Image: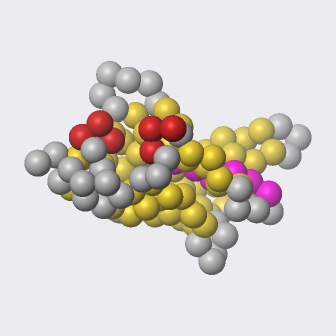
Amino acid sequence: QVQLVESGGGLVQPGGSLRLSCAASGNIFSFNVMGWYRQAPGKERELVATITSGGRTNDADSVKGRFTISRGTAKNTVYLQMNSLKPEDTAVYYCNLEQTAWTKSVYWGQGTQVTVSS
């Protein structure tokens, strides 16, 4: 089993920055993909960014050039640096980890609220 604990959400003004953190623990494989997803009220959960254990990243078009996903020196941590935040970035942000043995396993954190408002 894998546990994911997020931190770093909050209220920020438009144009501001926030940094989200996620720490994974438990039975984690050497190769995995960690990422951030978000869900705004009344909308479906959507991909924000992912990063493989080898450092390959994938960003949603809506956040390219503003958000940066990275891994910590402890490989089971992942960060999301969010700059130039917009009101439409307001959502609950969820940390995600995916890894495959015989089957693919997907794990989610509890979510952290990000609100961008003046």
Is 87 left, or right, of 61 in this rendering? Answer: left
Residue at point 51%, 38% (across, down): 61
Q: Is residue 10 visible?
A: no
Q: Quadrant of residue 76?
A: bottom right
**Image coordinates for residue 22, horizontal then vertical, percent:** 50, 61
From this viewpoint, which residue is outermost toward the bottom?
73
**Image coordinates for residue 77, horizontal then vertical, percent:** 58, 66
Nearer to me, 47 or 14: 14
Residue at point 33%, 41% (across, down): 89
Q: How is the image coloured?
A: secondary structure
Is 31 left, or right, of 63 in this rendering? Answer: right
Task: Please count the marks in the image.
Answer: 0
Q: Is residue 66 above or below residue 63?
A: below
**Image coordinates for residue 92, horizontal then vertical, percent:** 36, 42
Is 13 left, or right, of 53 in this rendering? Answer: left
Nearer to me, 3 or 36: 36
The magenta region covers 31-37
Residue at point 45%, 38% (across, down): 62
From this viewpoint, which residue is outermost toward the right?
102
Q: Is residue 87 visible?
A: yes
Q: Quadrant of residue 7?
A: bottom left
Q: Is residue 95 above or below residue 62?
A: below
Q: Main secondary structure of the magenta part?
A: strand
34 is within the stretch colored magenta: yes
Q: Is residue 16 above or below residue 62?
A: below
2 is within the stretch colored magenta: no
Residue at point 21%, 50% (across, down): 14
From this viewpoint, which residue is outermost toward the top?
42
From this viewpoint, which residue is outermost toward the left?
118
